[in-house]
Amino acid sequence: MAEPIKLDELICEFKEEIAERIPDANFDLCLTCGTCTGGCPASEQYDMDPRKFLRMLLLGMDDEILKSPWAWVCTMCGRCQSACPMNIAIPKFIYNVRASWPRDKRPKGIRGSCDQHIKSGNAMGVPKEDFVFTVDDVAQEIKDEQPEFEDLEITTDRPGAYMAINQNSREPVTEPDEMSPLWKILHKAGADWTYPTVMWGGENYCMFLADDEGWRYIMEEFVHHIEHTLKSKVVVNTE
Amino acid sequence: MRKYNIPHNFEFKSIIELYAQWIKDGTLKINSDWNKDLKIKFTVQDPCNIGRKIGTNRIVDDLRFVIKAVVGEENFVDMVPNRSNNFCCGGGGGALQAGHTDQRRAYGKVKFDQIIETGADYVITPCHNCHAQIEDMCHHYGGKYYTVHLWTIMCLAMGILGENERTYLGPDLADFGLTEKEES
């Protein structure tokens, strides 16, 4: 006959550890209703789902949690928590699971993008000179070929610009012509804006990698550049 | 920045809010006349980051306002569920670079089915990750829709979309607006 689980004997080190970092985690309030799982597109992948993963945490199955690749299939989209009647912080749980993987065992693609971002300010690892060159080059092409936009002005690091805009680095790097429509709209609207060149990539793979230190560094550098060099009033993300 | 309590004086905005504001106050002159007879149908993928994750539908409602202004209200077909209750496309959270490709595509099947259900010819994806994922699923599952950035359709509606800026348009719109311009 199956033995009942003796709650007093459970050792849930991982749960204790992350609950300390997330004061509003509410892990112990799980009713096992499965609403999270019913609306989760990652359910069943790798034979896992949010309810099961949370049960494992509550039953102290710490090693099994860290062995499952599921934390990298979940996108931390937050649908589970918004549906959860007890408002359990499942995405933050996943983030902390990711953060508990040794850094060199986390997915190479995400890690590489995070490392590049720390080093060169964007996930593609493009030097800022190349970014500035591409922007100038594409802008010149529009001015030459589209008479309606001959007075188009695109600037990088222009102090005092009202808006600083950051955009996904894949646009300038892999599909530069996708920048033009945005510029034209801004031009038509008469927007006063510039591209920052420090931490200019709008993406954030260090967040996905759950690399707190890297994430914080990127944000601090970016904020410092805006506050001290550009002094822009508004930061705009294109996504 | 909230997470790390980094002090700052600037305000954070999504470009979608600005588009909506500019259209409302007349700064940006844009309308849907171009699609009155074509009747090309559009749907939209709500980026989780500007929907559910900000805790209000404010920006995703702006997004709908902009799209309806640009393609015509009757040519916009919403997915169900949507806005803050949307399904993630499966490309977020680094999934596109996490290496679990089969799982990522199985995850995205939910979104693919939702898109097909709308019958839309185009999916507007204001987020770059959503764009990559939704386009990949179209190829993988044999869909017939096209995946476009919002700015492409806005410029198309204003008649200012250049020749090189049409990578993601289908054959129905690939040349739209180009010939008349050359003649004039």
Image (spheres, grey):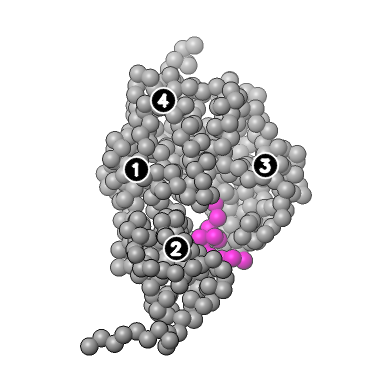
Q: Is A209 included in the stretch rendered in magenta?
A: yes
Q: Quadrant of residue A81?
A: bottom left
* Disc assigned to residue A234: 3
What secondary structure is found at the residue carrying circle 4?
Answer: loop
- Same subunit under labels 2 and 4? no
What secondary structure is found at the residue carrying circle 1?
Answer: loop
Q: Quadrant of residue A214?
A: bottom right
Three-letter code, disc 2: Met
- Same subunit under labels 2 and 1? no
How far apart marks 4 and 3 lie (CA) works out to 30 Å
Q: Chain of mark 4?
A: B
What's the residue at 36%, 57% (across, down)?
Answer: A40
Name above or below for residue A164 compared with residue A224: above
Residue A1 vs residue B157: left or right?
A: left
Three-letter code, disc 3: Val
* Sequence-first disc among 1 and 4: 4
- Please tell me which residue lies in front, B62 or A212: B62
Q: Residue A237, how many percent across, how many down?
A: 58, 44
Residue A151 vs residue B131: left or right?
A: right
Residue B25 vs residue B152: left or right?
A: right
Three-letter code, disc 1: Val
Dot 1 corresponds to which residue? B80
Q: Nearer the viewer, mark 1 or mark 4?
A: 1
Dot 4 corresponds to which residue? B72
